[in-house]
Amino acid sequence: MTLLALESSVLAMAGVEAAHPIYEAFGAQVRERRTALRLTQQELAGRIELTRGSVANIEAGRQSVLLHQFLAIASALQLKPVELLPVVKEQPTIGEQTHMPDSVLDAVKAIRKSVGSRLPSRS
Amino acid sequence: MTALRPRYARIEELADNLLREARVGNAPVPIEEIVRGQGIVIRSMDLKDISGLVVRDGNTTVIGINQKHPITRRRFTLAHELAHALLHEGKEVRYDMDFRVDFRSGVSSLGVDVEEMEANFFAASILMPWRFLEAEPVVAGLDLEDAAAAVKILSTRYKVSPHAMSIRLGNLGARASAFSGSKRLA
């Protein structure tokens, strides 16, 4: 087998390693909705043809989710897929920003100090 | 000026040029050396909820990296910030918060910043260059059962997270299919 199969094989290895933080957020959302609907993990698992263990792993963010599973979960939880979709928060560009978080201001100050900046620090 | 869509070809070329200039021929890529080679100062520091930032101060460019993050993450952040420093000029301070997700129901909020996509693609390109990966026996002879093992071996060798490596290898698979023009395996 060659590289051609690699893409799908990489997808198939879902859950092998500690997942991306997005899965934790997704999992928490699934759990919240499931408990709100008073479903057990077993019951949800039955509706989406996964094992209870997989549902537990998904909720804990330990398992990546394939697209068809994502759609099945949304449907089982009576949500539109988009309502279950984790969204990456857009960061406004600096030019548009009226204000930077304190952690950024502190870091900028520390950096300017460490490189011996002669420019006045801006507030 | 912000590009409308990620300039993938240009970014890969830039990463490749930097590797050749620094005479890097194998993994792990010495990303700190490459960054310093560009005259950029690196500061490892307590950044709280920021993973990295670029500060331009007169003629000096400094990249700050969150020292609390694991080495694989710090390397990726450093490469990511290098992309901002080289490709996205003009901003005096540019920072990247820790990955954040939230759940909203509006499709309009789905956009991901083009510059972020470019910076991530650059980081992957320079830390996991195609020509290095294509020469890996474990990649050339890969089969389905071995994918997880290959990701593990390669992520260790390239000093990147398994997550980053699996995405890169997935793209390599897609690229190989596109180049060969053969039918994709189901």
Image: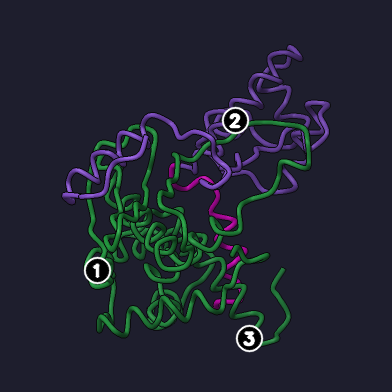
* Residue appearing at x 70%, y 29% in the figure: A45
Of the pair B79 and A50, the residue shown nearer to us: B79
Three-letter code for the amino acid on which mark 1 is drawn:
Gly
- Per the rendered image, the range of residues in magenta is A1-18
Indicate the position of residue B86 as horizontal and vertical percent values: 41, 68
Answer with left or right where residue B27 lies relative to residue B15.
left
Which mark is nearer the camera, 2 or 1?
1
* Residue appearing at x 77%, y 42% in the figure: B108
Position above or below: A30 against B93: above
The reply to whether the magenta stretch includes residue A14 is yes
Question: Which class describes the residues within 10 Å of circle 3: few (<14), some (14-19), or many (20+)?
Answer: few
- Chain to which mark 1 belongs: B
For residue B164, the mark is none
Question: Which class describes the residues within 10 Å of circle 2: few (<14), some (14-19), or many (20+)?
Answer: many
Q: Which residue is label 1 attached to?
A: B39
Indicate the position of residue B169 as horizontal and vertical percent values: 50, 67
For residue A27, the mark is 2
> Which color has been applied to chain A in this rendered view?
purple
Chain (green): B
> Image quadrant of residue A84?
top right
The reply to whether the magenta stretch includes residue A32 is no
Q: Which residue is label 3 attached to?
A: B179
Colour mapping used in the image: by chain
Indicate the position of residue A71 as horizontal and vertical percent values: 77, 41
Three-letter code for the amino acid on which mark 2 is drawn:
Gly
- Element at badge 3? helix
